[in-house]
Image (tube, grey):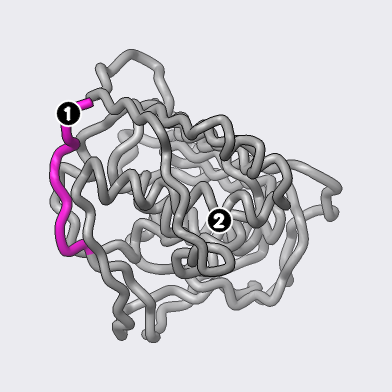
Amino acid sequence: MLLRLICIPAVFLALAAAGAQAPEPQNGAAAPVFDVTAIHLHEPQPHEHNSITSSPFDGHFLATNVSVMMLIHWAYEMPETRILGAPSWTRSSYFNVEAKADPALDLQLRNMTADTGRHEKELMVQAMLADRFGLVTHMETRELPIYELVVGKKGANLGPVQPGGSSVRTSNGQIEVQAANSVSVLAEELSKVVGRDVVDQTGITGRYDLKLLWTPDDAVAAGADAPPPIYTALEEQLGLRLVSAKGPVKVLIVDRVSQPSAN
């Protein structure tokens, strides 16, 4: 079973769930760039996971076993369900990426807030995608089928507010969230499972330790003790439910992207 573990600051996760647009350079300054970037096609290994590691306080970016779609998602704060027009290989081909900035930029990032440093790193990954993958994009707003995440009839069952924790773990039939604005983060993860954008309409903010277990539609011979389907599990375990709707959705259109240029 493939476990996706993406180590990302919680503040990014909350913005990503809201579908925030890509950040602009701070104070009109030129966007920073990585000084050296190495990209290699990933060689699959058993029991591996996908990871993106990026501190807002240094110029080092490390991604292991990630698709171009995952990189676009990270750099543009855009859920994958809202990234349209990309060819199939951006989801099926996996790469290892290591990028480093000039030491002078490390010093600048150390003197920034976490939020500002995160914005700078996103701009750097955007520039890397444009330079090495020839990525060209634009934003549109489209009327699309969505799900609204709302509180169920018996009320939310999220447990106590947590003082800390910043991680998201997903696998086939399981989502675990520990992050600021946990329900919004859960909505984004649900989008990847149900195939539609999920908009958090619960009005619930705060940091919770959320765990959702369900039996996937493609599960073979689920036993009597197996968890229920995802829609039932969501209401039984967390007191939340999904309601079909239509709404304006901001999407990122991929106009052009190519296999990475040589190192």
Side of 259 where 196 appears, left or right: right
Decide: is 17 above or below 92.
below
Mark 2: few/some/many CA within 10 Å (<14, 14-19, 20+): some
What's the amino acid at mark 1? Ala
Q: Percent from the top left, x then y, of residue 169? A: 55, 38
Position of the C terminus, as image quadrant, is top left
Please give the label number shown on residue 262.
Answer: 1
Q: Which residues are magenta?
A: 254-263
Label 1–label 2 contact, CB within 8 A: no
Q: Residues within 10 Å of mark 1 (few under 14, many from 20)?
A: few
Q: In this orientation, does residue 244 appear?
A: yes
Whole-angstrom CA distance, mark 1 to mark 2, is 27 Å
Nearest the eye: 149 or 216: 149
Is-magenta flag for residue 139? no
Image quarter of residue 123 = bottom left
Q: Position of residue 3 (x, y in %)?
A: 45, 30
Left/right of residue 251 with respect to residue 191 in the rendered view:
left
Of callouts 1 and 2, which one flags the residue occurring earlier in the amino acid sequence? 2
Q: Which residue matches tag 2?
A: 119
Q: Position of residue 129 (x, y in %)?
A: 30, 47
Coordinates of residue 170 in the picture (x, y in percent): 49, 40
Report whether residue 191 is seen.
no
Q: Residue at x 49, y 66 (%)?
A: 24
Say which of 87 and 3 sits in front: 87
SS at mark 2? helix
Q: Is residue 6 left or right of residue 109?
A: left
